[in-house]
Amino acid sequence: MDDRHLLSFSREDMREIGYAVIDSLLDYYDTRDQRRVAPQLDHAALEAILREPLPHEASDWRDVLGQFQQQVLEATNHVDHPRFFGYIPLANNFIGVMADTLAAGHNIFNAVWLQGPGAAQIERLTVDWLRQILRMPAQAGGTFVSGGSVANLSALAVARTIWLDGEMSGAVVYCSDQLHFAISRGLRVLGFADEQLRVLPSDADYRLSLETLRAAVQADRAAGLRPFCVAAIAGATSTGAVDPLDALADYCADEGLWLHVDGAYGAPAILTEPGARALRGLGRVHSLALDAHKWLFQPIECGCVLVRERQWLQQTFAASGAYLKDMEQPGEEKNYGYLGIQLTRQFRALKLWMSFKVFGLDAISEAIAQGFANAELAERLLREAGCWEIVTPAQMAIVTFRYRPPCGDAALADEITHGLVGQLLDDGGAFASGTRLRGRPVMRICANNPRTSEADLRQTVALLGRLAVELHAALKDQR
């Protein structure tokens, strides 16, 4: 009898499917470094996907897996490739991948204590490990979420509840012009008007200026407004800059302001000597957003929000229904569905817990430190090439730069720098993304992947130089 209406397979079939999936992963890992970083897109084939009719009849799983490999995987940028330097590279690890498989396969529901007490204990333990790493006080706590966007949104929701008691009229949030848009979007979702966010000009090092902040707060108070939150950065996406966290913590304590830090990619750098220096004061914040799928090398999704007093999460998000009363247990942090936005939620903590256990914190710290070394080497190679202007030196695994033509034409330099992202996508040998600083386009290399080698960096800098020369020649001919 065909059991497909039960949505199940025999043990033998499941083993065959599982082995095929694992073999697919191993084949990818074996060949990843030789693959193009960015795919050569077949737009007609991609459009054909959208015309596929809703399937009513069964298909062989082998055909479906093959379709994934051909139509999805081959049309995907490999963000874990050692020559992917765009945005924030997502260099995961195989233990984390297998942990996600276990969590999904066992369908663990980590929201209400009696439905998954083991998972709840692992999440609380792993959050506490992060608390210790980030040097937050013993009473701090947190919860795992999808990523930095939800972590920042959750933290701002806590700030609204605890500091404002939900009353938002006249309240003002302060940040620099380098802060991630997750903050402004999160505030909008929470009901704040756009004018309640003060975006202040960053200083010469692209950091939030304490003097500028102090003046803005004084002016707003004089105007009858209610300054209540400073949103700082622990590793700006564009430059790697870190706001003066220790000084901001002093100021916020004196002024009664909530200090939130977006440390989505940069916070784990506290495990290294240069990172600890840059992040001094991080443990003094009221709330913090962190993405373990960035500089803690986990598969997507693995975000975390931490707050200085763990009960703040429950005070902000606790809600329940009659149908859950039999499942609830008293005590702090037992029902994770009441500590954040989601009720039905994945067991995201498992992959970080298993990675910490299998590799050990020392190995993970060394992997983070490699990102600093990679960026410093990239800066040296760019300087040696002679055709690049370093805009911001290597910091927190990021270096930014722009093309410097022999003629010194600034407009031409901007045009070539801006065009390099498209040239890299077409070439596929490496990828670096662009941004804008002080109104001008720049390129950036984020080199936080520990599997990036010196050869990868040399190849990438050489490729950038060749593409810039080719683009320069093409633009010269057009003129």
Image (cartoon, grey):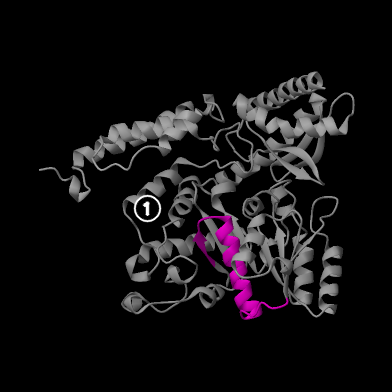
* Position of the C terminus by quadrant: top right
- Could you say which quadrant of the image residue 207 lies in? bottom right
The structure residue drawn at horizontal position 39% and vertical position 61%, both measured from the top left corner, is 119
Q: Which residue is mark 1?
A: 103
Left or right: 427 with respect to 277?
A: left
Label 1 element class: helix
From the viewer's perspective, is residue 236 above or below residue 143? above
From the viewer's perspective, is residue 255 above or below residue 127? below
Please state the horizontal and vertical placement of residue 324, each as a whole percent of the image: 34, 75
Left or right: 224 with respect to 142?
A: right
The structure residue drawn at horizontal position 45% and vertical position 29%, both measured from the top left corner, is 45
**Relative to the observer, which residue lies in front, 154 or 64?**
64
Q: Categorize mark 1 by other alpha carbons within 10 Å: few (<14), some (14-19), many (20+).
A: some
Q: Does residue 430 appear in this view?
A: no
Q: Label 1 is placed on what type of residue?
A: Ala
From the viewer's perspective, is residue 468 above or below residue 148? above
From the viewer's perspective, is residue 194 above or below residue 14? below
Range drawn in magenta: 142-170
